[in-house]
Image: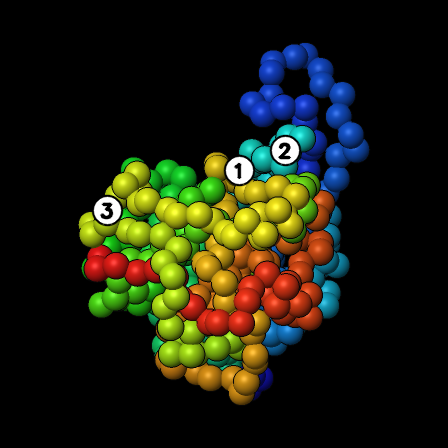
């Protein structure tokens, strides 16, 4: 039995990135574009690479094809402890159209085979502190095999209705999702908590930051982060956010250590929908002036979230997930990891490292640890 900080289930593939002059792409018989590049892609690979770069002991398991794309995945993830089964339909692929502002549109080929299952033998000898499950079809059956292991998932741009996502939404302990397709994000977050086992839901909201809702807790709003430089490519930024958040949860400050409220960063009306959440200033003037640019609303359905000034992270002994609630530190670390991803080219090739993340946190925040502003849900 091997011990890992995190087990990532499913979600590796190949991204073919095409840099286009505009989105939506105007119709033309031919567009001449810069070199088209094949890269490691998809959400599970991004979370695994991000967590490994942050020093978490990472195990990744998946089904990939016996094809050139599968070989690219194996090479790209060769520095991580991985186990693979064979995907009969081949390796997942995406074509990513990226405009000059870094916005992207993804054409996803899941290469799914109905009834395909992930052999438990690929991960039965792993004892993880946490498991993150991608929304690949076979992953829904893995929850039942992870009894006693805290789990998370990312529903991405779920509309709150599509039944495909429900097994993931209602079986995970920690749920990430985007507000991009939700008419009322707060209502969907409440629904996930009411119908499922989740204790925490994190909903990303573009330039408006994110909402965090915990079971028996308040709805908290965190404003969006300024970026450390110009946006280059937003691909993989949401997966980087998840990696940074999980790093904060597994290695960061316990919630009790960062729950001292300072001046409010935002206010959330009781029962408010997404449209009625009123956010205050996203950052101090000095922070904004130090940033070359900020995340634009609607970029890939992802954004990155920092609350008001906070202390730099002091990492102590690891604590169990049961001892950790959602601290502002976790949100901020996710924000910084995601912001970094926006300023580097590609999908997952250059995730932020642990020293760089902690240095960015120290540069960005002051000396007082604060939580996001909260109000009765």
Residue at the location (46% across, 59% down)?
A: 308
Residue at the location (48% across, 54% down)?
A: 305
In this image, 339 relative to 246: left or right?
right
Residue at mark 1: 296
Quarter of the picture containing the C terminus is: bottom left
Residue 340 rendering spot, x and y as whole percentages = 64, 54
Residue at mark 2: 101
- Neighbourhood count class around disc 3 (C-alpha, 10 Å): few under 14, some 14–19, many 20 upward: some
Compared to residue 26, the image places residue 337 above or below, namely below
Label 1: state its secondary structure: loop
Residue at the location (63% across, 37% down)?
A: 102
Compared to residue 279, the image places residue 307 above or below, namely below
Residue at the location (79% across, 33% down)?
A: 35
Compared to residue 250, the image places residue 178 above or below, namely above
Label 2: state its secondary structure: loop
- Neighbourhood count class around disc 1 (C-alpha, 10 Å): few under 14, some 14–19, many 20 upward: some
Q: Nearer the viewer, residue 70 or 66?
A: 70
Quarter of the picture containing the N terminus is: bottom right
The color scheme shown is: rainbow
In this image, 120 relative to 174: left or right?
right
Q: Tell me the distance, in whole angstroms, between the alpha carbons under discs 2 and 1.
A: 9 Å
Q: Is residue 166 visible?
A: no
Residue 153 rendering spot, x and y as whole percentages = 43, 59
Q: Is residue 340 visible?
A: yes
Residue 241 rendering spot, x and y as whole percentages = 53, 57
- Where residue 375 sits, quadrant-wise, is bottom left
**In terms of sequence position, does the residue under pointer 1 or pointer 3 come before the other?**
3
Residue at mark 3: 272
Residue 76 rendering spot, x and y as whole percentages = 72, 58
> Are circles 2 and 1 on residues that touch, CB within 8 Å?
yes
**In terms of sequence position, does the residue under pointer 2 or pointer 1 come before the other?**
2
């Amino acid at each position: 039995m091997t011990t890992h900080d995190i087990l990532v289930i499913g979600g590796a593939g190949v991204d073919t990135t095409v840099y286009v002059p505009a989105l939506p792409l105007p119709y033309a018989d031919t567009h001449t574009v810069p070199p088209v590049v094949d890269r490691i892609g998809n959400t599970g690979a991004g979370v695994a690479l991000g967590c490994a770069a942050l020093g978490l002991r990472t195990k990744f398991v998946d089904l990939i094809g016996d094809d050139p794309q599968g070989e690219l995945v194996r090479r790209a993830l060769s520095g991580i402890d991985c186990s693979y089964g064979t995907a009969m339909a081949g390796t997942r692929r995406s074509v990513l159209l990226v405009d000059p502002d870094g916005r992207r549109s993804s054409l996803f080929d899941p290469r799914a085979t109905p009834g395909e299952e992930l052999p438990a033998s690929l991960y039965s000898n792993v004892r993880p502190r946490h498991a993150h499950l991608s929304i690949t079809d076979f992953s829904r059956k893995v929850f039942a095999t992870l009894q006693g292991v805290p789990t998370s998932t990312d529903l991405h741009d779920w509309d709150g209705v599509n039944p495909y996502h429900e097994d993931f939404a209602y079986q995970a302990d920690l749920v990430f999702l985007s507000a991009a397709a939700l008419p009322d994000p707060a209502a969907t977050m409440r629904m996930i908590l009411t119908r499922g086992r989740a204790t925490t839901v994190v909903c990303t909201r573009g330039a408006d930051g994110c909402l965090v809702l915990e079971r028996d807790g308040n709805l908290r709003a965190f404003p969006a982060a300024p970026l450390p430089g110009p946006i280059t490519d937003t691909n993989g930024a949401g997966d980087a956010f998840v990696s940074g958040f999980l790093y904060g949860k597994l290695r960061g400050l316990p919630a009790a250590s960062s729950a001292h409220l300072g001046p409010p960063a935002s206010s959330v009306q009781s029962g408010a929908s997404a449209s009625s959440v009123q956010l205050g200033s996203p950052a101090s003037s000095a922070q904004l002036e130090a940033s070359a640019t900020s995340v634009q609303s609607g970029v890939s359905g992802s954004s990155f979230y920092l609350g008001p000034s906070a202390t730099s992270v002091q990492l102590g002994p690891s604590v169990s997930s049961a001892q950790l609630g959602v601290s502002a530190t976790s949100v901020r670390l996710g924000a910084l990891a995601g912001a970094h991803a926006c300023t580097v080219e590609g999908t997952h090739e250059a995730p932020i490292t642990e020293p760089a993340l902690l240095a960015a946190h120290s540069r960005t925040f002051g000396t007082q640890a604060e939580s996001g502003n909260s109000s009765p849900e």
